[in-house]
Structure formats: structure tokens, C-alpha cells
Image (spheres, helix red, strand yellow):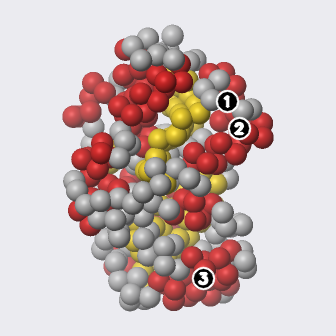
Amino acid sequence: MNNPMHLADIQGDLQREPIRAGFGRGLKKAGEIDTRVVAACADLTDSTKMNAFAEAFPDRFIEMGIGEQDLVTVGAGLAAMGKIPFVSSYAAFSPGRNWEQIRTTICLNDRPVKIIGSHAGVSVGPDGATHQMLEDIALMRVLPNMVVIAPCDSVEAEKATLAMARDPRPNYMRLAREGTPVITTAGTPFEIGKAYVLVPGEDVTLIATGTMTYQALVAAERLYKEGIDAEVVHVPTIKPLDAETILKSVRKTKRVVTAEEAQMHGGLGGAIAELLAEHYPAPMRFIGMQDRFGESGEPDELIEFFGLDAAHIQTAARQLLGAH
């Protein structure tokens, strides 16, 4: 039996940092590496952490104001002229408000615009349902040509930003608002299109993305103490999926729990179910928002209330194994 990372024992010692902070660092570095990198924001420069890039490269930054449709169409135009544009807003507004413009000007024309949707998930907290974007994974992964990324922490977000700047396709990356435990390091690998086995196991596969990867790791630690050997697979790229890594894990354990801080319909869970239905049908449980909107509250309180915490992942795994 494999002994997983002992994260649950050191939760209080883990550094916490907003995932969006890593994006901000990565964008500035991308701008230093390649002068084609430009940025535009919809009146949320500080909140989306584009401020460091704007200060370093004022001639390569455009403040669009509150105009998300203009934001992405200008991005498409910049890409058509050979630039590498990053465009940011809250995910509730981009892609929430401008999906048709993303579809028509970016995806249909296959322009390498990098769309950053910040403040995604219920962990946005007190801002409530209007600002808690939960449908973005489903909206973006259905678009032809679009890459969909959800980093698990700020360190991975920085790496993902640099990788996006090099990627020739349209990209969407979702970012959380609140401080998230930093569970990766500078040496942890990241590649667009790759999933990673963080904890090997034999009994059940826990597949998670974004902020939920930490919760899956804590669940694996708790399950280990119960005698259940859970494998944790982190999926930072939801589209395209790393089918090889996912199928290898599920063929071994024959059971899977998916976890995401988003609507479970059409999101990561739906993507995994589609993959398994075609190649290796297996019993599944889905951790995610169950066809409802969020509410106002403290981030940790909301994660627990909506069943998005390690305890609910743990329960789902037990149910698959017939344990109680």
C-alpha cells in the first residue's frame, strides 16, 4: 500500500497565495521573454493581477474599461496582427458575458488569444452568486480549438501562463480569488495537455482540477488512514485531456471520483465520463456544484456547504468501495 503525501498533517504550515498572483508573475515574465506579448483588461487590472505587466510595459497594455465584448474582439485583432494577447476580467463576465464574441472572433478564426477568467468558483465568497462563475469550464471546453486550463496553485499558474504564451492555440485559464494552499514547487512539471499522478494508489482514482486538487490530496491522506489506497490525479488541462494518464489510472483502480469547483454538468466530471464511456466504463462519483447557483458567505464555509471539501470526496470514495 502506498503512503501518500502527508498534507493533512501540515495543513496549517502550507503557504497560501491567490492563484491569480502566479498569473501576474507569469505574465510579466512572458512579456520580458517575448515582445509580442500584449495585455488588455476590462477595468480590473489590480484584481486580475495584470498590474505588474501594465507597469512594466505600459505601451503594450490596453485598459478597455467595462466592455468585455470589446476586450476579446480587440484581442482577436491583436492576434491577427501577430501579437500574443492576454485578456482578463472576472470569469463571470469573460467568458460569462462575451461567449459569442469568443466563439466567433477567436475560436472560429483560430486566433491565439489567451483569456483569463479570474474569481471563478464559490470561493469568491461574499460577492455571491452573480460573481461566482461556475459554468465557465463547460462553456469553454465545448468551443472548437479552445484549450482549457485550471491550475491548482499560484506556482502552477505562473508556469501555465508562460506555457500559454508559447502555445499557438486559443487558451482559457480560470483563476481563484482567495489564498489557495501552494502544493507544487518550482521543480514540479507542467505541460499543457498533461495530467499528473500526485499520489499513487490501487483502490480508487481521485481526479481533480484547480483548487480541488488540494482537497483530493487531503482526502487521500484521510482514506489512507482508513486503509483505502487512493490515487490522486491532478488535471490542470481539462481540454485537451491527457487520456493516456487518466485511462491508465482508472484501469488500475476501476473506480473514479472527480472533483471540481464548478458545475459538475459539462465540466471536468463530464469530460472524464465521456472519455470513460468510450474507452473504459467504470463506476463514478462526481464532486461539484449540483445544478445550483452559489451563495454569499466565507470561502471555506461555502466549500463545505456545497460539498466541495475533502470530507465529501472521502465519502464518495467510500461509497464506490462499498465502505461506510
Label 1, label 3: how far apart the Cα atoms are? 38 Å
Q: Earlier in the sequence, mark 1 or mark 3?
A: 3
Pointer 1: residues within 10 angstroms few (<14), some, or many (20+)? some
Left or right: 125 as drawn, with respect to 307 = left
Q: Would you identify the image quadrant in which residue 255 lies?
A: top right
Q: Is residue 125 above or below residue 215?
A: below
Pointer 2: residues within 10 angstroms few (<14), some, or many (20+)? many
Disc 1 residue type? Ala
Disc 2 residue type? Leu
What residue is pinned by disc 3? 101
Left or right: 7 as drawn, with respect to 269 = left
Find out whether the residues at labels 3 and 2 contact each other: C-beta distance under 8 Å.
no
Find out whether the residues at labels 1 and 2 contact each other: C-beta distance under 8 Å.
yes
Pointer 3: residues within 10 angstroms few (<14), some, or many (20+)? some
Label 1, label 2: how far apart the Cα atoms are? 7 Å
What residue is pinned by disc 1? 282
Q: Which callout, 1 or 3, points to the residue nearer the camera?
A: 1
Image point (38%, 43%), residue name: 308
> Could one spot residue 146 in this view of the protein?
yes
What residue is pinned by disc 2? 276
Q: Give the structural element (helix, strand or loop) at label 2.
A: helix
Q: Would you identify the image quadrant in which residue 158 lies?
A: bottom left
Disc 3 residue type? Gln
